[in-house]
Image (cartoon, rainbow, N blue to C red):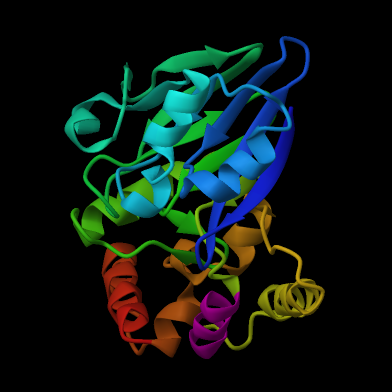
């Protein structure tokens, strides 16, 4: 499994997946046609388009790519009316193969009510769109804070070795928020050094991995007493802590 990161729009990432044994080429969340096709045309084919959710900055390239390469478009079946060109309708917990690669569909509402992730369990690779970011999580646009909290908990239970490929380069801003409310976190301070180094070299901060995120991403640390104390909410439930953090981040 080869993964190529494609920078799109202002801060989006699309991901090209190449499975060499069967010469299968797929893309996750093509934000725009031009930037994606510049890379895809080197392979002269695009078998599959995988969409995590319907927002235009994740499906903007769907129709032109489908027309050019006769690609199949996969998305959540219950969101089929909002995903351009969709012709394969996925269900929660369904397993699907692209070439010799098998992924599991994980339903993770919150950012949108039809958001899904693609988890390649054997390879320990997760494409999670705008639900989980490096040191952050997505805004809650259509769902509820409770849904987003539960969705993040689903992802927390994956293998700690899982590599996380998210939809945006938000890591620097997210790190500033995390350190404000988790200022004594040594692992976070070390991660910030790496982030700054990567960005100075104009390198992506993605992929991150779940083990790092569990130690440093404040939205995955709502059960930590130090975070609760920093918010002056030491007796609050984990979900209440999440809702408080999400509200603070929305105006950060």
Q: Please, what is the dominant secondary structure of the magenta stretch?
A: helix
Which quadrant of the rendered structure holds the C terminus?
bottom left
Can residue 14 be spotted in the picture?
no
* Total tally of numbered discs in the picture: 0
Q: In this view, does 113 lie above or below 95?
A: below
Kindly identify the residue that appears in the image at 25 percent across and 51 percent down. 147
- Location of residue 174 in the rendering, given as x and y in whole percent from the top left corner: 52, 76
Kindly identify the residue that appears in the image at 33 percent across and 68 percent down. 242
Specify the segment rendered in magenta.
Answer: 172-181
In the image, taking residue 232 as reference, residue 24 lies left or right, namely: right
Q: Along the line of sight, which residue is nearer the eye, 214 or 77?
A: 77
Q: Quadrant of residue 201?
A: bottom right
Which quadrant of the rendered structure holds the N terminus?
top right
- Location of residue 149 in the rendering, given as x and y in whole percent from the top left corner: 32, 56
Q: In which quarter of the image is residue 251?
A: bottom left
In the image, taking residue 76 as reference, residue 44 lies left or right, namely: right
- Location of residue 234 in the rendering, given as x and y in whole percent from the top left corner: 36, 81
In the rendered image, the residue lying farthest to the front is 68
Can residue 2 be spotted in the picture?
yes
Q: Is residue 102 above or below residue 144?
A: above
Q: Along the line of sight, which residue is nearer the eye, 111 or 217?
A: 111
Q: Is residue 35 above or below residue 138?
A: above
- Location of residue 110 in the rendering, given as x and y in whole percent from the top left corner: 27, 52
Kindly identify the residue that appears in the image at 38 percent across and 22 percent down. 93
Q: Along the line of sight, which residue is nearer the eye, 147 or 130?
A: 130
Q: Along the line of sight, which residue is nearer the eye, 225 or 158?
A: 158
Q: In this view, does 227 lie above or below 60?
A: below
- Residue 37 part of the magenta segment: no
Kindly identify the residue that appears in the image at 65 percent across and 31 percent down. 17
């Amino acid at each position: 499994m080869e993964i190529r990161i494609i920078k799109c729009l202002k801060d989006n990432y699309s991901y090209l997946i190449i499975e060499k044994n069967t010469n299968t080429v797929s893309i996750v969340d093509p934000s725009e046609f031009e930037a994606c096709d510049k890379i895809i045309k080197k392979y002269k084919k695009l078998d599959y388009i995988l969409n995590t959710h319907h927002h235009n900055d994740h499906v903007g390239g769907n129709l032109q790519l489908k027309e050019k390469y006769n690609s199949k478009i996969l998305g959540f079946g219950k969101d089929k009316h909002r995903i351009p060109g969709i012709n394969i309708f996925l269900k929660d917990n369904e397993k699907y193969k692209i070439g010799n690669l098998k992924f599991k569909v994980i339903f993770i509402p919150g950012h949108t009510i039809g958001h899904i992730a693609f988890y390649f369990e054997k390879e320990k690779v997760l494409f999670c769109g705008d639900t989980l970011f490096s040191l952050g999580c997505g805004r809650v646009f259509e769902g509820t804070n409770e849904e987003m909290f539960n969705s993040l908990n689903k992802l927390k239970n994956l293998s700690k070795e899982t590599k996380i490929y998210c939809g945006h380069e938000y890591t620097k801003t997210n790190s500033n928020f995390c350190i404000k409310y988790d200022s004594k976190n040594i692992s976070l301070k070390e991660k910030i050094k790496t982030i700054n180094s990567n960005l100075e070299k104009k390198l992506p901060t993605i992929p991150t991995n779940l083990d790092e995120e569990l130690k440093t991403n404040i939205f995955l640390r709502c059960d930590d007493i130090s975070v609760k104390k920093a918010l002056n909410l030491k007796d609050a439930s984990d979900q209440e802590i999440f809702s408080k953090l999400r509200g603070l981040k929305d105006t950060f």
